Image: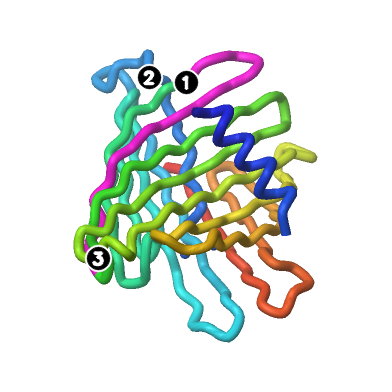
């Protein structure tokens, strides 16, 4: 599954979708939930879309050992929330692999069930990651869709990283809509700020500003 996901990253970035980006799985699956401390993270994504209303997409996640809990708003659709539960796995020391399969419930303007997954592979200062899901819309089957946010980044310093990112949506029985772009991220202690620019140099660019905090 991971190989297929990262091949999709390479293929997408070689081509010319709201998200977000993606939450990072945190704790080791080998550590029991009872013994591990809670790790809380909050990320707020601001979408500046050309000729459309801008909006904010907040995501809060809580991890304790293998347990992953998550809540999102404006992610699967505007005025739509989702709640998730997942299982954290991690492996490796030099090459660090993390994966969190999840299942979520979507409610609001869109309603449905969504299996999803986040995964990352890190080696020294290089990190490849992907967050994806398929939303089975229980109100309108034709509104079901696949969404994915892959990215690859390199940490130039302990506080600065740069990279490439993409987002793409595959609505039910429609053509694949892809956006690709670049990212620049800054971090300080428990805070981080990342700017994503999709469709740079084109008529309809999309800018995503992310502010995150780990508790």
**Precedes in sequence: disc 3 or disc 2:** 2
**Image location of residue 38, percent across then percent down:** 33, 32
Of residues 189 and 52, the one nearer the viewer is 52
**Precedes in sequence: disc 1 or disc 3:** 1
Residue 183 has which mark? none
**Image location of residue 144, percent across then percent down:** 34, 59
Which image quadrant for residue 196?
A: bottom right
Of marks 3 and 2, the one in the foreground:
3
What residue did someone put label 1 on?
A: 90
- Whether 141 is among the magenta residues is no
Indicate the secondary structure of the residue bearing disc 3.
Answer: loop
The image shows residue 10, relative to residue 112, as above or below, that is: above
Residue 29 has which mark? 2
Q: Are marks 2 and 1 in contact (CB under 8 Å)?
A: yes
Q: Residues within 10 Å of mark 3 (few under 14, many from 20)?
A: few
Magenta residue span? 91-108
Of marks 1 and 3, the one in the foreground:
3
**What residue sits 50% from the left and 34% below the top?**
119
The image shows residue 66, relative to residue 108, as above or below, that is: above
**What residue sits 46% from the left and 53% below the top?**
147
**Image location of residue 54, percent across then percent down:** 50, 78
Q: Is 145 on the left or on the right of 186, as rendered?
A: left
**What residue sits 26% from the left and 71% below the top?**
109
What residue did someone put label 3 on?
A: 140
């Amino acid at each position: 599954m991971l190989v297929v996901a990262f091949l999709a990253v390479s293929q997408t970035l070689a081509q010319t979708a709201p998200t977000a980006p993606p939450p990072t799985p945190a704790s080791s699956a080998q550590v029991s939930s009872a013994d591990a401390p809670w790790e809380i993270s909050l990320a707020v994504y601001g979408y500046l879309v050309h000729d459309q209303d801008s909006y904010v997409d907040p995501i809060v996640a809580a991890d304790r050992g293998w347990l992953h809990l998550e809540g999102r708003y404006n992610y699967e659709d505007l005025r739509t929330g989702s709640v998730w539960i997942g299982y954290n796995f991690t492996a490796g020391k030099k090459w660090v692999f993390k994966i969190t399969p999840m299942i979520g419930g979507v409610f609001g303007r869109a309603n449905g069930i969504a299996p999803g997954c986040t995964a990352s592979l890190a080696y020294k200062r290089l990190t490849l990651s992907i967050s994806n899901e398929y939303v089975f819309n229980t109100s309108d089957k034709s509104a079901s869709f696949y969404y994915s946010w892959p990215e690859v980044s390199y940490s130039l310093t302990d506080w600065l990283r740069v990279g490439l990112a993409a987002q793409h949506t595959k609505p039910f029985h429609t053509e694949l809509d892809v956006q690709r772009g670049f990212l620049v991220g800054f971090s300080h202690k428990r805070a981080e700020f990342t700017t994503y620019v999709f469709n740079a140099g084109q008529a309809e660019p999309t800018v995503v500003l992310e502010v995150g905090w780990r508790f």
